[in-house]
């Protein structure tokens, strides 16, 4: 129960940071996708089910406040959380290369599908421009921010796992 509460607060805080602080700190008119980082981390650290849970609610928050269609971002984030959950068996606290690669790939997949469904279907076919000016800078910025945030999320995950283990031995 505590984990779900912490995840709910995290979604809210990451959304606020993404929409306020990091919009002000945007570079080349792009900002990092913090909710994608949270979705990736939940799936990678805790598995498919939690990745889907965090992804769905992160995307739903974006859809409610920014989306043109309710459910589009929720579906994309849910799939990203689920796919990152497959790599849970390879989760190792000290490894940084796999998480960085997964965030890089997740951000590319999200941006690509966002382009396909929001721009290409509206006959805006200049993908190379979108790739160079939007997708790549956002991916790089998101990866750099991931390097800073991922360690904090690891510590929070360890503390929650220790709390859950203590709680299970008390009542179990």
Image (cartoon, grey):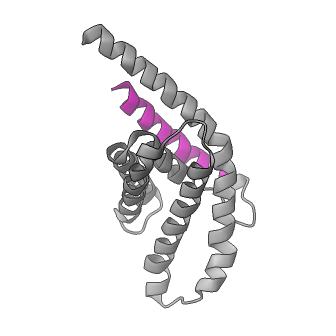
Counting from the top left corner in percent of width and height, residue 172 is at 24, 13
Q: Residue at x 46, y 79 (%)?
A: 116
In the foreground, 32 or 171: 171
In this rendering, the answer to whether 123 lies above or below 67 is below
Magenta stretch, residue numbers: 1-22
Residue in view at x 37 percent, y 66 percent: 72
Q: Can residue 118 be spotted in the picture?
A: yes
| Residue at figure coordinates x 54%, y 50% from the top left | 37
Q: Is residue 153 magenta?
A: no
Which residue appears farthest toward the left when viewing the image?
Answer: 172
146 left or right of 35 in image: right
Q: Give x and y (percent) for residue 2.
A: 38, 25
Would you say the magenta stretch is mainly helix, strand or loop?
helix
For image coordinates 37% across by 58% down, the residue present is 74
Residue 49 in the image: x percent, y percent? 32, 45
Can residue 30 be seen in the rendering of this structure?
no
123 and 148: which one is in front?
Answer: 148
Farthest top residue? Answer: 170
Left or right, 26 with respect to 71, comes to right
Q: Position of residue 36 (x, y in %)?
A: 51, 53
On screen, 122 above or below 8?
below
Q: Quadrant of residue 149?
A: top right
């Amino acid at each position: 129960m505590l984990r779900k509460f912490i995840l709910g607060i995290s979604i809210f805080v990451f959304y606020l940071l993404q929409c306020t602080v990091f919009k002000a700190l945007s570079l080349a008119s792009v900002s990092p996708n913090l909710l994608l980082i949270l979705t990736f981390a939940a799936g990678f650290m805790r598995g498919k089910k939690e990745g889907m849970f965090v992804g769905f609610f992160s995307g739903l928050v974006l859809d409610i406040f920014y989306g043109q269609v309710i459910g589009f971002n929720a579906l994309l984030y849910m799939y990203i959380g689920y796919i990152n959950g497959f790599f849970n068996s390879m989760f190792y606290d000290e490894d940084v290369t796999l998480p960085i690669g997964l965030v890089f790939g997740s951000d590319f997949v999200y941006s690509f599908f966002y382009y396909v469904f929001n721009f290409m279907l509206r006959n805006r076919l200049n993908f190379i421009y979108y790739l160079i000016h939007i997708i790549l800078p956002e991916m790089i910025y998101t990866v750099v921010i991931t390097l800073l945030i991922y360690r904090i999320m690891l510590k929070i995950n360890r503390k929650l796992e220790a709390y859950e283990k203590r709680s299970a031995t008390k009542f179990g």
